Image (cartoon, coloured by chain):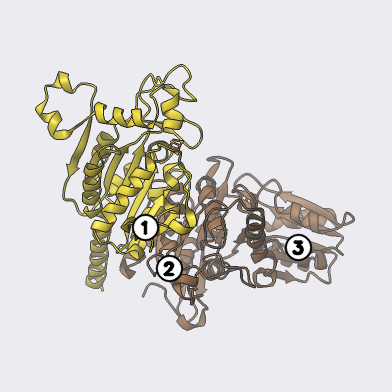
Chain colours: A yellow, B brown
Amino acid sequence: MPAPLPYEYKYLRSKKKFPHVWCPGCGIGIVMGSIIRAVDSLSWEKDNIVMVSGIGCTSRMPVYVDFNTIHTTHGRALAFGTGVKMANPSLNVMAVMGDGDSLAIGGNHIIHAARRNINITAVIVNNDNYGMTGGQFSPVTPEGARTATTPYGMIEPGFDVCNLMEGAGASFVARGTVYHIIELDKILIKAFRKKGFSVVEVLAPCPTNFGRANRLGGPVEMMKLLKENTINISQAKAMKPEDAHGKVVRGIFVDKVSIPYDKRYEKLCEKARNSAGASR
Amino acid sequence: MIVPWGETKLIQGNEAVALGAVAAGIEFFAGYPITPSTEIAELLAKYMPLLGTKWIQMEDEIASISALIGARLAGAKSMTATSGPGFSLMQEGLGYACMAEVPLVLVNVMRGGPSTGLPTQVAQGDVMQARWGTHGDHPVIAIAPSNVKECFEMTIRAFNFSEQFRTPVILLSDEIIGHMRERIAFPSEGDLHVEPKPIPDVPVEWYEPYHVTASNVSPMACIGSGYRFHVTGLTHDVHGFPTRKEKEVIEKMNRLKHKITRRLDELEDVRMHDVEENPITIFAYGSVYRSALAAQAMLKKRKKKVGVFRPVTIWPFPDRTVKEILDSKEVILVPELNQGQLIHEVERMTKDSVRVVPLHRIDGYEITPEEIVNAVLEVM
Ligand code: SF4
């Protein structure tokens, strides 16, 4: 008798859609695994989960998971998701996007999704560049880095995704990596539970493009970099500023209570009906 | 009660569109403010919360049409309203809705272009953008109302077409019709046909979102109804998953085309006034059709007879009827509020011996009946 399949298979379109498109050593599959574990521990019904994505390597994820899946146009995952969530607020909506997708072409949509506090979880897989089109710079590519469109090095400063999202008003903001996977599972569970707009930035390697262009080594070396170059938020607090310098901080930066958009809209409808009734 | 069923009222064209949307059962509106369409969004912002339906002002037009697609996938009948510059931005989402076969209604209250152009003035400059604005081959349905009553009725028709053909439908209004006021008699509530959202009746495990049927349209399940499927703007197979297999790509593309071209009878709507018996025809649509009718009456008084031919459904263009009826004419005068757009379709469908004469107006004002009369007298 064949061994029973791991429970993750329940959430995958495993028979039809594999092998996947991602390169060996890519971080995106690890994020997908983490999302599946989080969903499973929340006991969400597959019928009630909607995964939207934009365009790019990360945005291919919806093909592989057995949810309601929408692979949208470049940058628009959150705009599509906003429509889905408003039409049916009982659905659990998540948007998976890459850094270029969510922050360059989709930059307008993500700040407004955060401001509006729409009850969606945005998972941003940050691998420092546009992977699918061959490794061009994105709004988070570090200064000095080489990419296909910065042959002499990146001269633009990058976004700090978590600061940006906090400033835009997100209810939950966190950063994890595909190396610190248990931590990431926990962060995702909290993000999915959050009522309001939640954002999880996940640092992940793109060995094929960013890694190669910057001589960062193969997948293993790039994973090691995630381990060495990042520190947990509590570690950071305990450290002297000079020791923490240059390290990227992981953890939950914002976790606040704020009424999500769908609830506000419900209240608005009540108000409208009451005032219409009163004026009659 | 928001729609004044059975009453006669003096209302604005844009207001009639908003009321038509309510009558058609709109459940989701997303839009971005733009002149001269804004009244539609403003009125729905008032009506929809009263009905418990969803209204949202998005951060731009791209977001608006994207939200519309998401909402319709989740089961809500959806509409947006915009004008030229916003229409340009919406082309991305329009193409997606064509490809993924998501019904929605897009109202374009046309104004002068290109670019910011003449924001408060009339034009018919988006006729070709409506047909070919988004990239790639794609099906298009566009209808052009000419008066306030039609704004109401044709908004409902646009919703109905979008559900019947599972595709976006463009209502091509213009600044004159959008802002004019006319008395209209509303029908009784039951008198209008409102197309229900088709839902699949096959077991979940048999469901193919792009199943090939005789009509080339298969019912779209709503997200959350238990039918889990994949939606993408990539060329896809019957299950909705991306494909590059030649046979499947060709099948998909042909089906998109044929769902319109093989059901032209259901879509065609032309109005003809004394066309058959007269050698001269004025071919006009939208607000210009009103001037054409007035010009026809003025000419009649001078004992000069001309016909008026109006396509209500602009896209697909009524090829067959134009060929059948107008190919034997001596002169076809085509007044348009642009530098010549739909005239090319008329030329395409008529033989060289037919003189197809343009009459343009591009300064943001209407084409008056007098101008049409003069143009007719010149060609007579
Ligand atoms: S190009 Fe980079 S991001 Fe894309 S699949 Fe390959 S490794 Fe992953």
Number of other residues with Cα within 10 Å of mark 1, as a class: few under 14, some 14 to 19, many 20 or more = few
Number of other residues with Cα within 10 Å of mark 3, as a class: few under 14, some 14 to 19, many 20 or more = some
Label 3 close to label 1 by CB (< 8 Å): no
Residue under pointer 3: B319
Q: Is residue A264 above or below residue A276?
A: above
> Is the CB atom of the residue marked by disc 3 within 8 angstroms of ligand 1's nearest atom?
no
Q: Which residue appears farthest toward the right when viewing the image? A: B353
Question: In this rendering, would B192 be left or right of A118?
Answer: right
Number of other residues with Cα within 10 Å of mark 2, as a class: few under 14, some 14 to 19, many 20 or more = many
User: SS at mark 2?
Assistant: loop
> Is the CB atom of the residue marked by disc 1 within 8 angstroms of ligand 1's nearest atom?
no
Residue under pointer 2: B227
Report the image quarter containing ligand 1. Answer: top left
Judge if badges 3 and 1 mark residues of a common chain.
no
Quarter of the image with the C terminus of chain A is: bottom left
Of all chains, the one bearing label 2 is: B
Q: Which residue appears farthest toward the front when viewing the image? A: A1
Look at 36% across and 30% down and name the residue there.
A140
Residue under pointer 1: A9
Label whose residue precedes the other's in the sequence (3 or 2): 2
What is the spatial separation of the Cα atoms under label 3 and label 2, in whole angstroms? 39 Å
Look at 49% across and 37% down and name the residue there.
A132
